[in-house]
Image: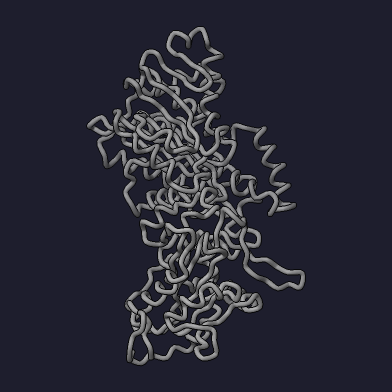
Amino acid sequence: MTNCRTGCREIDEYIRLVRSNKYPACKEQYQLCNFVEQIFVNENLYVDEDQLQKYLSYQKYFPYKLFEWEKFLFALHNCTYCPDGSLRFPIAVIFVGRGAGKNGYLAFEDFCLLTSTNGIKEYHINLFATSEDQAKQSFKDVYNVLEDNKKKMSRHFYWTKELIVNTDTKSEFTFCTSNPKTKDGARPGKVDFDEYHAYENYKLITVAKTGLGKKSRPRQTITSTDGDVRGGPLDDLIDICTKILDGDIPDNGQLPFICRLDDIKEVDDEACWHKANPSLRYLPDLMQQLRLEHAEYKQNPVANTAFITKRMNRPPRARENGVTSWDNILATNQTIPENQLIKRPCVGGIDYMKTTDFLGAGLLWRVEDKDIWLSHTWVCRESADLHRIKAPLDEWETRGLLTFVDSPQIPPELPAVWLAMEAAKRQSQLMRVGIDDYRYTLMRNALLDINFSADKDYGNIKLIRPRDEMRHIPIITAGFVAHRFVWGDNPCMRWMCNNAKTIVSNAGNMTYGKIEPKSRKTDTFKAFVAAEIVSDILDPFVAAAPPQSITNGVYIY
């Protein structure tokens, strides 16, 4: 496909530039070109050329001109309409390497939409970020344009360092930080999310978006590089964008502009850096800076991960001392085969640091070459660490993955009864439970109530000691690599696992610990480790005999 089909010069020029192969472009850019052209072929769209050219004329007030990729995005996001006059692409996702100029683009776009060229009165724009400095960045760019053109702009704008108002349209531009309550009930025409990678949950995002729709032609612009938060909103967003470009799901108005290395192995090929940064061809000073950062990255990759993560948008998938790579953690998202668990024996695991904090428990079945893990997490409402945690705990409770406990501590009966009942639901014999040696005392009576004890008369609880963990870490690591673990779609478990690290002693022995002791939790992952340690009783699998009786939810054989 060499002929451009949209009929808009700004859109067609960028498509032609990508396909010229003068500079390397990533797979997603070629997909985007095909995606856009196909939409123009199949749908009765139109680009408002008069509006677009009027918008572009405002470049004269800015200290920079838009690059081809920015004009392409701008035309599609702001001036491409359906027959009913609605925006075809109300949501723009801009995922480019650091230094490409996404804040400058955002400043120009927001300035334009404040003006009468937009044609909508009181088209308020709220710019969100997780830090005040980041939230101010594009706002300051617009503020500086107004200051630099004060004589002209004072006829149409009023501005302070916290608010910009177009006096013709009464449209307001403000920046906002991370308190979602301050924006509840707002009526914006447009919402911006800057550096989306920094969001660890959807609280602020949800509140910010709920105000949209009260003004005509609502828009969102999302900008980001990659970051270090895994399993958060950015990972979800990029997953959706790639599925759109692959043709697996409808776009629903999203315009996915993704620039990154196709493979982390390309990091040493300077020409491939253009894949992550479409502005790089015009910025020789930035190229020089990237060469310096690349040399530092090569010398010490661990200390300079920002180069591969934020400059190239291709983060290393395994962190230093992490339990395993993020790809291997994601691979646990396999459907739990409930029908294969019926009457099959299982083992359990329990772990917690304090009953006034988090507690995790679960059951593990071995089905052929897969270890099936069904888990639950309990959270004490009075935990002193709750205010530090940014994970979407409320959402996970809604999904049934965890339970908040409204008492000074988590009663030990809760996990004990949960293990018993979940095993009973599947007519499974709960053969053994693993729990840390130091945690057993508090749980002893609750576990005894379901006929489990470490005493010799029972012998169906194994008290886990560090040496047990040391022996099983290589086995668990191999299980992750082989994608043998099945946890279902459980973001709480993935979060717990991603918060754990391996600790190597001077003697070379390994145990699992926390990456950060207070704001990150690992309890349910450690419960999984305890269950794995006692899982040898499941090999080889021998079909369980029919249950003879049931006591407190546990089948007695």
Q: In which quarter of the image is residue 75?
A: top left
**Residue 174 position in % (x across, y down):** 46, 26
Please say whether residue 367 is visible from this viewpoint. Answer: no
Q: Identify the residue at horizontal 46%, vertical 44% (top origin).
A: 29
Q: Nearer the viewer, residue 354 or 397?
A: 354
223 vs 371: above or below: above
- Position of 515 compared to 163: left or right? right
Q: Quadrant of residue 97?
A: top right
Quadrant location of the C terminus?
Answer: bottom left
Q: Nearer the viewer, residue 523 or 174?
A: 523
**Residue 179 position in % (x across, y down):** 47, 37
Please say whether residue 288 is visible from this viewpoint. Answer: yes
**Residue 55 position in % (x across, y down):** 41, 21
Q: Identify the residue at horizontal 50%, vertical 83% (top origin).
A: 453
Q: Identify the residue at horizontal 76%, vertical 73% (top origin).
A: 507
149 vs 129: above or below: above
Q: Nearer the viewer, residue 288 or 301?
A: 301
Quadrant location of the N terminus?
Answer: top left
400 vs 52: above or below: below
**Residue 268 position in % (x across, y down):** 66, 51
529 vs 395: above or below: below
